[in-house]
Amino acid sequence: MKIAMVGSGYVGLVSGACFADFGHDVVCIDKDASKIASLDQGVMPIFEPGLAELVASNVKGGRLTFSTDLAGSIAGAQAIFIAVGTPSRRGDGHADLSYVYAVAQELSEHLTDPVVIVTKSTVPVGTGDEVERIIAESGTSAQFAVVSNPEFLREGAAIGDFKRPDRIVIGAEEEWAQGVMKEVYRPLFLNKAPILFTSRRSSELIKYAANAFLATKITFINEMADLCEKVGADVQDVSRGIGLDGRIGAKFLHAGPGYGGSCFPKDTLALLKTAEDYNSPVRLVEAVVKVNDSRKRAMGRKVIEALGGEARGKRVALLGLTFKPNTDDMRDAPSIAVVQALIDAGAEVVAYDPEGMDAAAAIMPGVTMVANTYEAVEGADAVVLVTEWDAFRALDFSRVKRLVKAPVLVDLRNVYDPGELRAAGFAYSSVGRP
Ligand code: UDX
């Protein structure tokens, strides 16, 4: 089957490469000529484990190509995916749909039938209706259907998530379009990945509801962590103790500095906007957004406390800057608020991140970026573990202790054992543990 993927960013590129790997004939399209030129040379625009290899093998196999020419690339495609960005609109938090609608408009002028237009971008309820209206009003004679198929890919684990999904959600009302989507996902279907067919609006909402629920789960355990610190309990035991209840589930119960990234912050805000538009408040999610925002700033204060309440003139080493490991993505990373709090309090901040420093340097001009962990900790009054990269999971603490000015470690991801670190002579603090 021929598939066109419009938008070769994170979602489009991973999905396109995986579809090609299933044996489909895929063209990934993007308006950004330099991105397409780089992809043609095997250079990935993002860091995602396994992606470069997957792209290379499918290009070599003749199943994956790249193009800037939408009109010339979609002929004969039975499914055309829209996977362009839907950033938060400045000011009101609403998802900016201008890229999605521009693609719909352009597609409408070049459709050959029959074709299924699939919205993979995260879009508010009702967007599929608008895409359908735009195409229908163009007067195209092609038979088309507009369906919703949200992605649930985690950065850093996106290929595995695509190939072994918990479920595939497809919002398609027409039977023939459901048939095309079954063909698209047949390899996964055969692997018994559950495919859920719903109405288009339900499918659009599933994506936001899933992300808002996960953001809520994280925020819940983060507040329990704060309570643990006050009452002398251990949040990791609390997580385990509640997570073993099958109704709750053990995943997404790791306390930390607050959620960040390209999805949860943006999607929770967009859900609130939809709720407001339909006059149906989701107060729980409103609270989650507020609590998470204030948490990120509170982490900066936690570091200052570990410095004895005074940060002026102190040197703080941050290990990790990205919002989570195995990505170079800095969007809404908790480190941004931590850095701001430390710089406002007069600290000197030095940082090392395995992949995120280029992106971070652009938004944190006041931070000195260094080439490795041990260079970062040299002369530090406090070391802060911000992102749980594997590279920070087995630090040589006797070496760290020799290099730092004061052996103070703030572990915002609860990677280390408090007893062991204290025995090694560190003033150690973490999140929600005595
Ligand atoms: C998320 C969703 O998981 C994915 O399904 C969706 O399609 C896109 O958004 P992603 O943003 O890549 O994926 O990362 P994820 O692994 O979900 O982590 C999001 C944030 O939550 C990170 O900042 C992470 O550190 C934080 N987190 C996650 C926690 O603080 N505790 C947890 O237990 C889990």
Image: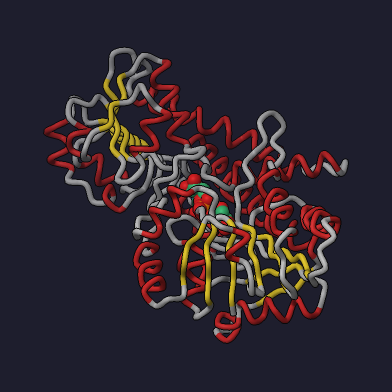
Would you say 182 lies left or right of 27 here?
Answer: right
Q: Looking at the image, which is closer to me, 19 or 160?
A: 19
382 vs 193: above or below: above
Please name the residue shown 46% across and 54% down the image: 237
Determine if residue 252 is in view. Answer: no
Name of the residue lying farthest toward the bottom: 190
Quarter holding the N terminus is bottom right
Percent position of residue 117, x then y: 71, 65
Determine if residue 291 is in view. Answer: yes
Would you say 147 lies left or right of 392 here?
Answer: right
Please name the residue shown 30% across and 20% down the image: 348
Please name the residue shown 50% across and 79% down the image: 22
Please name the residue shown 11% across and 33% down the image: 402
Percent position of residue 299, x then y: 46, 31
Percent position of residue 279, x then y: 88, 41
Would you say 112 lies left or right of 424 here?
Answer: right
Q: How many marks?
A: 0
Percent position of residue 258, x then y: 52, 40
| Quadrant housing residue 171 | bottom right
Quarter holding the C terminus is top left
